[in-house]
């Protein structure tokens, strides 16, 4: 059975390139649709939520990928989300995973690695670019220095 994939990406050229490469590299993937931002994605899912995996950009106009991920995780918990982004900072990684993302890949990964991530997440895994996995391990090993604690201290939250 094919893995049904949607792409949420505001860059038209990047979205088209990603779609083309995924389709060329695998017969295991069926492209469902592309959304230009989180609002567009939510509207498309209301019409057809028969999607297994969403490749989600973070920085988009209207509604960013983290906010969209949170909504999708609540309303469509069966859909797996891979953040596919250029951002590798601790805060975005932490917020993405907290919002419900099950994977985090950087856009500079090869199409074969992205495809591997799609297959991994569909099978219940949690794909991450090596540098992201290293950051997550560092955050887990040093919870006192985690992004959440830094955020709390910065805004005097308890």
Image (tube, helix red, strand yellow):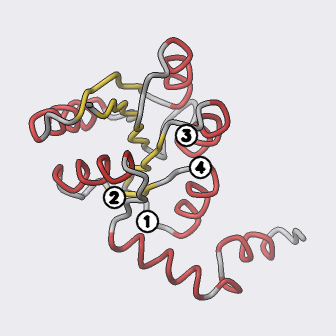
- Looking at the picture, tell me which residue is in the foreground, 36 or 73: 73
Distance from the alpha carbon under mark 2 to that under mark 1: 7 Å
How many residues crowd around disc 3 within 10 Å: few (fewer than 14), some, or many (20 or more)? some
Residue on which disc 4 sits: 100
Q: Does residue 136 sit above or below 6 in this rendering?
A: below
Distance from the alpha carbon under mark 3 to that under mark 4: 14 Å
Residue on which disc 2 sits: 106
- In what element is the residue under mark 2? strand
Q: Earlier in the sequence, mark 3 or mark 4?
A: 3
- In what element is the residue under mark 3? loop
- In what element is the residue under mark 1? loop
Q: Earlier in the sequence, mark 4 or mark 2?
A: 4
Q: Earlier in the sequence, mark 3 or mark 2?
A: 3
Q: Quadrant of residue 6?
A: top left
Q: Does residue 142 sit above or below 107 in this rendering?
A: below
Q: Residue at x 78, y 73 (%)?
A: 154
How many residues crowd around disc 1 within 10 Å: few (fewer than 14), some, or many (20 or more)? some
Residue on which disc 1 sits: 88
Q: Residue at x 62, y 88 (%)?
A: 142
Q: Are marks 2 and 1 in contact (CB under 8 Å)?
A: yes
Residue on which disc 3 sits: 64
Distance from the alpha carbon under mark 4 to that under mark 2: 17 Å
Kindly report which numbered mark, 4 or 1, lies closer to the viewer in this rendering. Answer: 4
On the picture, is 39 further left or further right than 11? right
């Amino acid at each position: 059975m094919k893995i049904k994939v949607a792409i949420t990406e505001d860059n038209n050229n990047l979205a088209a390139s990603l779609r083309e490469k995924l389709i060329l590299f695998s017969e295991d993937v069926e492209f469902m649709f592309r959304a230009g931002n989180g609002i567009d994605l939510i509207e498309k899912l209301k019409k057809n939520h028969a999607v297994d995996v969403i490749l989600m950009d973070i920085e988009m106009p209207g509604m960013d990928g983290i906010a969209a991920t949170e909504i999708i995780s609540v309303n469509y918990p069966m859909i797996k989300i891979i953040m596919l982004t250029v951002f590798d900072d601790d805060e975005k990684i932490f917020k993405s995973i907290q919002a419900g993302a099950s994977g985090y890949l950087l856009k500079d990964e090869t199409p074969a690695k992205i495809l591997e991530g799609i297959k991994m997440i569909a099978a219940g895994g949690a794909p991450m670019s090596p540098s992201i996995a290293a950051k997550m391990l560092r955050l887990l090993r040093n919870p006192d220095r985690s992004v959440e604690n830094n955020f709390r201290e910065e805004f005097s939250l308890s």
